[in-house]
Image (cartoon, helix red, strand yellow):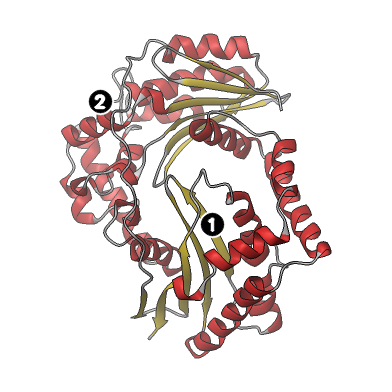
């Protein structure tokens, strides 16, 4: 993979991957998210992701939204527990238009009071909509369960009460404290030379004042397994169980990614999908999820089923976990599992917007980007003994927490 990168004196890094395509993609990745909020700032990182589109020193909301839309492109953003990204897709001749706009909304937003109040109502509607989707809500509630009172456990959206409390000074203070220039990466993918990209990036990002990070994220509190059942007014019961897992820098992270794919990845032939859906017909949606973070991680298994099938479903899941803990994968099983994961990663890399986000996130976290060949080597190095050891650590039944939304 051809990669060019440069770092400005203010700490902002630029990375570019040239490809032949009529469409370009770029994004500004910022190493801050809901985890970095103080207790009185719950939901503020996500709130800012919304309101940076509401006016700058030279643009009103309409002009911001129309700047990329007018040329057939798309402008968007997202917030996670640990990072924020503002990104765009556009025709290749509009690279400068997109990069200038990203710089304008991140560094020159004015946060008009009237717009802040309007967006509060939008986000409260988003929170209420989320509460109407138990399959999504349970994922956040589960992380709150396992991280307990730690900031990692708070949901990204905040609460109606916390959102209503925010004012312009809160927004500006959070940005000064957390939008640090040494924690930013501007990533681009498209048919443009590296020298041209760096020239454009320097024009709009090079003169941004230096603002380095002075604080460190605190360590996660000691994990204690917890189990909660509660009745919910739903059409089916929702179940999630899991454990804390390896962090972003753990050497066994590739092994757990492979194990997760075997157990409940996107393939229809995952062990949990075959056991719960294909063999027993007691679940429609089943998946396992591995989310590595800075200093910690989460591994979880989710499925929905009828209340009468909860015990039976859990028995099936625990039986599959026991197999992975007690019996190493055979040579052919391991080979096929590796081949499947490589195929999924390779196909995903053909989606240019996803590729841009993958490159940007990797450079933000590791200051490097692994080629497909590097990724293949890491996957090939995983042995059945690795997976057996990981299974006994992460899938230990005595260390699993669970949360059940029981259909009432």
Callout 2 secondary element: loop
Please tell me which residue is depicted at 51% across the width and 12% down the height of the picture: 200
Callout 1 secondary element: strand
Q: Which residue is most to the bottom?
A: 308
Q: Which mark is residue 105?
A: none
In which quarter of the view is residue 347 placed?
A: top right
Q: Is residue 30 left or right of residue 212?
A: right
Q: Is residue 343 left or right of residue 88?
A: right
Which quadrant of the rendered structure holds the C terminus? bottom left
At which x and y percent is residue 353? 60, 36
What's the CA distance linking mark 2 and mark 1?
Answer: 38 Å
Instruction: Determine which residue is flagged by label 1.
Output: 290
Judge whether 134 appears above or below 125 on screen: below
In which quarter of the view is residue 155 placed?
A: bottom left
User: In this rendering, does residue 334 appear at all?
Assistant: yes
Q: Earlier in the sequence, mark 2 or mark 1?
A: 2
- Return the residue nearer the eye: 137 or 213: 213
Judge whether 321 appears above or below 177 on screen: below
- Return the residue nearer the eye: 251 or 96: 251
At which x and y percent is residue 130? 38, 60
Question: Is the residue marked by circle 1 packed among few (<14), some (14-19), or many (20+) residues within 10 Å?
Answer: many
Q: Is residue 258 left or right of residue 400?
A: right
Q: Which mark is residue 110?
A: 2
């Amino acid at each position: 993979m051809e990669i060019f990168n440069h770092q400005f004196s203010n700490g902002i890094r630029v990375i570019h991957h040239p490809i032949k395509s009529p469409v370009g993609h770029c994004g500004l990745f910022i190493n801050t998210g809901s985890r970095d909020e103080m207790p009185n700032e719950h939901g503020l990182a996500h709130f800012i992701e919304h309101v940076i589109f509401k006016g700058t020193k030279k643009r009103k909301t309409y002009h911001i939204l129309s700047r990329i839309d007018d040329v057939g492109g798309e402008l968007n953003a997202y917030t996670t527990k640990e990072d924020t990204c503002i990104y765009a897709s556009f025709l290749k001749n509009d690279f400068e238009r997109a990069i200038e706009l990203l710089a304008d909304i991140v560094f020159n937003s004015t946060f008009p009071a009237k717009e802040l109040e309007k967006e509060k109502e939008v986000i409260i509607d988003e929170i209420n909509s989320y509460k109407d989707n138990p399959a999504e809500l349970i994922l956040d509630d589960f992380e709150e369960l396992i991280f307990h009172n730690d900031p990692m456990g708070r949901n990204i959206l905040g609460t109606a009460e916390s959102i209503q409390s925010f004012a312009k000074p809160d927004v500006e203070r959070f940005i000064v404290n957390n939008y640090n220039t040494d924690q930013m990466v501007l990533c681009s993918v498209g048919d443009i030379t590296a020298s041209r990209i760096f020239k454009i990036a320097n024009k709009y990002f090079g003169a941004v004042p230096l603002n380095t990070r002075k604080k460190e994220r605190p360590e996660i509190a000691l994990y204690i397994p917890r189990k909660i059942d509660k009745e919910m007014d739903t059409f089916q019961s929702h179940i999630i169980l899991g454990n804390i897992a390896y962090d972003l820098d753990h050497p066994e992270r590739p092994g757990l990614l492979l194990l997760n794919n075997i157990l409940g990845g996107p393939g229809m032939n995952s062990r949990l999908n075959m056991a719960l859906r294909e063999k027993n017909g007691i679940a429609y949606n089943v998946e396992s999820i591995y989310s590595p973070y800075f200093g910690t991680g989460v591994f979880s298994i989710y499925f929905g089923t009828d209340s009468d099938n909860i015990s039976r479903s859990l028995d099936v899941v625990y039986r599959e976990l026991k197999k992975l803990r007690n019996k190493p994968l055979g040579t052919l099983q391991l080979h096929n599992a590796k081949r499947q994961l490589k195929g999924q990663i390779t196909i995903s890399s053909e989606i240019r917007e996803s590729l841009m986000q993958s490159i940007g996130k990797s450079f933000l976290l590791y200051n490097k980007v692994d080629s497909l060949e590097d990724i293949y080597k890491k996957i090939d190095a995983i042995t059945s003994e690795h997976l057996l050891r990981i299974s006994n650590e992460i899938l230990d039944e005595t260390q699993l927490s669970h949360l059940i939304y029981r259909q009432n």
